[in-house]
């Protein structure tokens, strides 16, 4: 089959690779209904993570089960399923505590920018719908598998509460999903930090009440002005740079909470800074599996439409153009039709 392979920074190819096979009795093979490019895929594409050998790209997925291993009991061929980028058995102590992305048997997904993909830990990772979803819901169900689940975790980790003030650092797809999540969790005021008109408009549609265009210390000062000098109750950090992390922590009020989900690159925090900040920090790879049933239900009942975050749709054969468009910020997030 043809699939997406990153050979070197900036060198993405859609080329012939072996079809995935069952390797363990807990595996499943799915036929993807759609896939997409993640912001985290841009780190190796930009040369900010090493590419020592060709990498089979893609970790966001939804589709139909075509084959299962002998130990798989909960999902069956023919079912439409959504899974997480971090697979899990959903039974270990960490899974039972709601942190499936730290499962004792965790494997990170790969190779999902393709027609077919192997999903390890299928029973603990995949959630099936009761029936085949409508075609127009596929983008939103795809978003649930990572970008919405990650934005939701950012809001959950930041302890967004009804009536609270939330600020979102980052206007990429995850940040926009964080705005949506904060709205669903009842935040009264949602401050989106963005300099890009199209992203600002989508943030407002998803529930943002204020837009801040400044960054760094100036961005913090703007949030302080909006909150009468107090700071936000909750801050969602959805970028992963040193500047964005300091901006997030400094924008929160004392006792406030920061949910950080941007994969960190060059972030360094001193113990003294954290000691005197007096703020809660929780983040890391999102335990999407914890939220999957609820988020899928919100999509299937059409209460939310996270699929709008896909502002570019391409056939998967044009995946290289999708990477280029996201790298150049001409697209928020690219959906790939299989």
Image: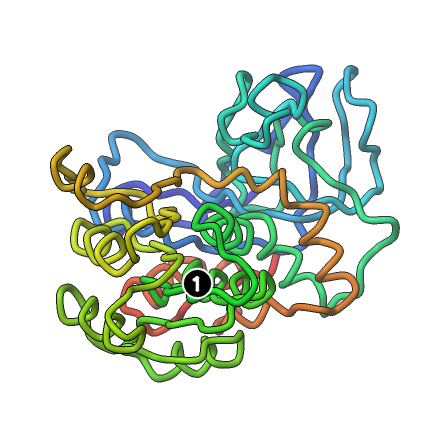
Quarter of the rendering containing residue 337:
bottom right
Q: Position of residue 330 (x, y in %)?
A: 34, 74
Q: Position of residue 23 (x, y in %)?
A: 62, 18
Which residue occupies 59% across, 32% down? Answer: 98
Quarter of the rendering containing residue 234:
bottom left
Classify 124 as above or below 46: above
53 or 149: nearer the eye? 149
Q: Is residue 184 left or right of residue 5?
A: right
Which residue occupies 70% across, 36% down? Answer: 126
Quarter of the rendering containing residue 201:
bottom left
Which residue occupies 58% across, 40% down? Answer: 84
If the image is split into quadrants, where does the N terminus sit? top right
Q: Is residue 83 left or right of residue 264?
A: right
Instruction: Report which residue position mark 1 lands on.
Output: 173
Q: Is residue 48 left or right of residue 176?
A: left
Q: Position of residue 209 (x, y in %)?
A: 44, 80
Colour basis: rainbow
User: Within 10 Å of the Cα at label 1, are there few (<14), some (14-19), or many (20+) other Cα atoms?
Assistant: many
Classify 226 as above or below 284: below
If the image is split into quadrants, where does the C terminus sit? bottom right
Q: Position of residue 99 (x, y in %)?
A: 54, 31
Callout count = 1
13 or 184: nearer the eye? 184
Label 1 sits on a secondary structure element that is helix
Residue farthest toward the right in the current orientation of the protein: 131
Which residue occupies 46% across, 62% down? Answer: 318
């Amino acid at each position: 089959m043809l699939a997406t392979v990153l050979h070197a920074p900036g060198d993405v190819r859609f080329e012939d690779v072996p079809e995935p096979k069952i390797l363990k009795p807990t595996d499943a093979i799915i036929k993807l209904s759609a896939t997409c490019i993640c912001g985290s895929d841009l780190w190796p594409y930009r040369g900010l993570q090493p590419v020592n050998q060709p990498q089979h790209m893609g970790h966001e997925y939804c589709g139909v089960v075509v084959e299962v291993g002998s130990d798989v009991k909960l999902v069956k061929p023919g079912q439409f399923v959504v899974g997480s980028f971090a697979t899990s058995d959903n039974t270990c102590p960490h899974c039972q505590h709601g942190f499936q992305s730290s499962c004792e048997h965790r494997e990170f997904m790969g190779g999902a920018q393709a027609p077919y993909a192997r999903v390890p830990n299928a029973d603990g990772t995949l959630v099936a719908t009761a029936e085949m979803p409508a075609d127009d819901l596929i983008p939103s169900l795809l978003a649930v598998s990572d970008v919405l689940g990650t934005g939701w975790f950012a809001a959950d980790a930041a302890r967004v509460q009804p009536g609270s003030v939330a600020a979102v650092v980052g206007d990429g797809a995850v940040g926009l999903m964080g705005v949506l999540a904060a709205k669903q969790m009842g935040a009264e005021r949602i401050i989106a930090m963005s300099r890009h008109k199209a992203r600002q408009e989508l943030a407002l549609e998803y529930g943002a009440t204020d837009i801040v265009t400044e960054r760094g210390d100036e961005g913090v000062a703007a949030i302080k002005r909006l909150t009468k000098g107090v700071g936000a109750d909750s801050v969602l950090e959805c970028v992963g740079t040193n500047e964005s992390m300091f901006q997030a922590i400094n924008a929160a009020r004392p006792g406030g909470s920061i949910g950080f989900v941007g994969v960190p690159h060059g972030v360094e925090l001193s113990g003294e800074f954290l000691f005197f900040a007096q703020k809660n920090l929780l983040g890391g790879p999102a335990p999407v599996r914890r939220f999957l049933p609820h988020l899928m239900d919100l999509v299937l009942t059409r209460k939310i439409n996270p699929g709008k975050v896909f502002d570019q749709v391409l056939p998967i054969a044009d995946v290289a153009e999708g990477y280029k468009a996201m790298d150049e910020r001409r697209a928020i997030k690219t959906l790939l039709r299989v």
